[in-house]
Image (cartoon, rainbow, N blue to C red):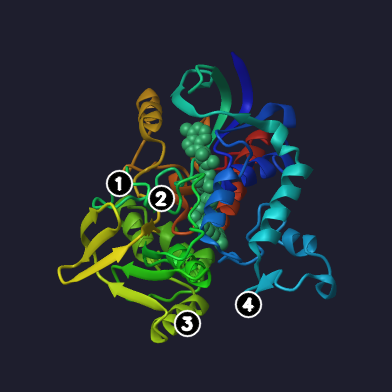
Amino acid sequence: MMTIDWLIIGGGIHGVHIATRLLGEGDVAPEGLRILDPGDHLLSRWRNATAATGMTHLRSPSVHNLDIDHGALQRFAGKRKDRRPGSFAAPFERPSLKLFNAHCEQVEKTFGLEERHIRGRAVKCSIDCDAVRVGLECGRELEAKNLVLALGASEQPNWPDWAPRDDQRVRHIFEPDREHWPAEPETIVVVGGGISAGHATLRLMKDGHHVHLVSRHALRQHQFDSDPGWLGWKYGEIFTQERDNDRRRTLITDARHRGSVPPDMGRALRRAIARGKLTWHEGEITDFAGEDDALLMTIDTDTTVRADQVLLATGFDTRRPGGTMIDELIASASLPCASCGYPVVDTSLRWHARVFVSGPLAELELGPVSRNIAGARRAGDRIVEAILSRSNGTSETA
Ligand SMILES: Cc1cc2nc3c(=O)[nH]c(=O)nc-3n(C[C@H](O)[C@H](O)[C@H](O)COP(=O)(O)OP(=O)(O)OC[C@H]3O[C@@H](n4cnc5c(N)ncnc54)[C@H](O)[C@@H]3O)c2cc1C
């Protein structure tokens, strides 16, 4: 069995950033670190999901990048006068997806991360006296002295009850490896009220399709998916001082602007609605029928829409990621969880002396930004600080 000093499960935005920080700042030797992820390459899920939406720029500013230094992406973009038009978008200097991905590639190259990648899926996980044992889908076993769980939520697309999974004309925008963009003009129902639904709608309209956008609520406009105050001391203090995990969960839920779009996208959608180019429905799909020649949907009780395809842009499930593998891990060492099922970790994001978490699993400690790139950076700060103070022999836990 292979014994690894640091094993990161998940090679997405979080796993890649934490690997970068461990190698660049945490004094972890490259040969002692591995990233386990089923993708052909690291960041495959990120690349698929962002390409599927048709988004051109990130929602977050350039300081939220995967390198060690906040300013690294700006430096990578070169001198302002030499930059390609569209490299950044206002407001807040949001990088283009192309530039952000090119910078991610450079970070991977600088730290040799592809060579650290084990292609595979963890299906079993348990804590023993001297290591964490991880069983892979292929039957192989790994042993890690330290484990970082960076699972993300992208393997849990939210699928409404009414939507059949066996009709090829109904697809979720975050299903990997599916082509979402029809070649011939069609009538397409996009379901969802957030930024992914907005991106997909605008792109489908641009390609000449007739789009119905069905959202449970009126257009909600927010530049970011939570108030930027959550990135600073303003709300951070409130969160830290709240020790009750149920109330922390409520703070997180209330802080998230789920199903919201940035102002420029809101304006573009409203303009299209006003010009009759986009048909907007506020309501729930209550009935669905897949006929041979069309898909029929009833919205609330009074509107029927006929379409060629349905594109679900309904985001991800909010349940704890990791399924039975995490259930087993919890059982192996009686790991603490809140009533919402999510880990209760210390301020260093340690669930156990050998297990750190990031992303959704770190939410009850990092708050509403935990899932974003900013959350990956926060997790990197805390984990690096923990291991440096461990090697200096000081205690890092509050
Ligand atoms: C379209 C879109 C646009 C976004 N734009 C922004 C933005 O502009 N700014 C921002 O801050 N945030 C943004 N986000 C939010 C967030 O930053 C991303 O969702 C990001 O991809 C989350 O990274 P992650 O590493 O937590 O998760 P993921 O990208 O889901 O990566 C997790 C990885 O872990 C792997 N994995 C899971 N289980 C196992 C297992 N058992 N064994 C091995 N591997 C496993 C998965 O296959 C996956 O590759 C966006 C999200 C989406 C969907």
| Ligand 1 lies under 8 Å from the Cβ of mark 4 | no
> How many other residues sit within 10 Å of disc 3, few (<14), some (14-19) or many (≥20)?
some
**Mark 4 vs mark 2: which is more N-terminal?**
4
386 or 34, which is in the foreground?
A: 34
Q: Which kind of residue does numbered mark 1 sit on?
A: Cys
Q: Quadrant of residue 297?
A: bottom left
Cβ atoms at labels 2 and 1 below 8 Å apart: yes
Q: Nearer the viewer, mark 4 or mark 2?
A: 4
Reading the image, the residue beneath label 3 is 267
> How many other residues sit within 10 Å of disc 4, few (<14), some (14-19) or many (≥20)?
few
136 or 75, which is in the foreground?
A: 136
Q: In the image, which disc is placed on residue 340?
A: 1
Reading the image, the residue beneath label 2 is 364
80 or 202, which is in the foreground?
A: 202
Determine the residue positioned at 36% across, 53% down: 243
Determine the residue positioned at 58% across, 40% down: 11
Q: In the image, which disc is placed on residue 257?
A: none
Secondary structure under tag 3 reads helix
Give the percent coordinates (x, y) of residue 267. Answer: 47, 82
Indicate the quadrant containing the N terminus: top left, top right, bottom left or bottom right.
Answer: top right
Give the percent coordinates (x, y) of residue 265. Answer: 49, 75
Q: Nearer the viewer, mark 3 or mark 2?
A: 3
Secondary structure under tag 4 reads loop
**Alpha carbon distance from label 2 to label 1:** 10 Å
**Mark 2 vs mark 1: which is more N-terminal?**
1
Determine the residue positioned at 67% across, 40% down: 22
Answer with left or right where residue 346 lies relative to residue 281: right
**Mark 1 vs mark 4: which is more N-terminal?**
4
Q: Which kind of residue does numbered mark 4 sit on?
A: Ala
Reading the image, the residue beneath label 4 is 90
